[in-house]
Image: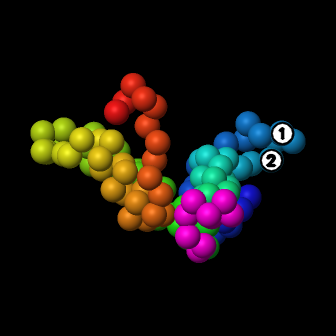
Amino acid sequence: MVGWTGLAPPASDASHAGGASIPAGATAFTFLVDGIAACMRAGAAPPADPTRVAVNVWTALHGMVSLRASLPAFPWPPLERQLDDTLLGLVRLHHNPPPSEG
């Protein structure tokens, strides 16, 4: 898996073909790395190490979700704005919400 070596948490997901034990979240993380690399190849994001950028996006988004869940009374900005600010800052990429979201 692209970029997963050395990042594996102790949990595992053995649901993949061949019964190989794959760290929990590895498939989703690989999808993120591949998506960021595709954006870079298409010129939608500046060239960089896609694994490094994916680690930063992954931790930022998990932090955003965790903090919002644990501090619901905090005066958070609208989620769409915060997500766009995060993606713009880390990947220089605007996310595209469905038309119904904004």
What is the span of residues highlighted in magenta in the rendered image?
Answer: 40-48
Question: In terms of depth relative to the viewer, which is nearer, 35 or 9?
Answer: 35
Give the mark toward the camera: 1 or 2. 1
The amino acid pointed to by label 1 is Ala
Dividing the picture into quadrants, the one containing residue 102 is top left
Which residue corresponds to the image point at 39% horizontal and 25% vertical from the top-left? 100
From this view, report whether residue 18 is shown above or below residue 102: below
Q: Which residue lies furthest to the top in this view?
A: 100
Q: Which mark is residue 89?
A: none
Which residue corresponds to the image point at 45% horizontal and 31% vertical from the top-left? 98
Question: In terms of depth relative to the viewer, which is nearer, 77 or 65?
Answer: 77
On the image, numbered disc 2 is attached to which residue?
20
Dividing the picture into quadrants, the one containing residue 10 is bottom right
Q: Do the residues labelled 1 and 2 touch (CB within 8 Å)?
A: yes
Which residue corresponds to the image point at 83% horizontal and 39% vertical from the top-left? 17
On the image, numbered disc 1 is attached to which residue?
17
Side of 89 relative to 55 (left or right): left
Question: Residue 88 location in percent, x, y?
Answer: 40, 60
- Check residue 43 for magenta coloring: yes
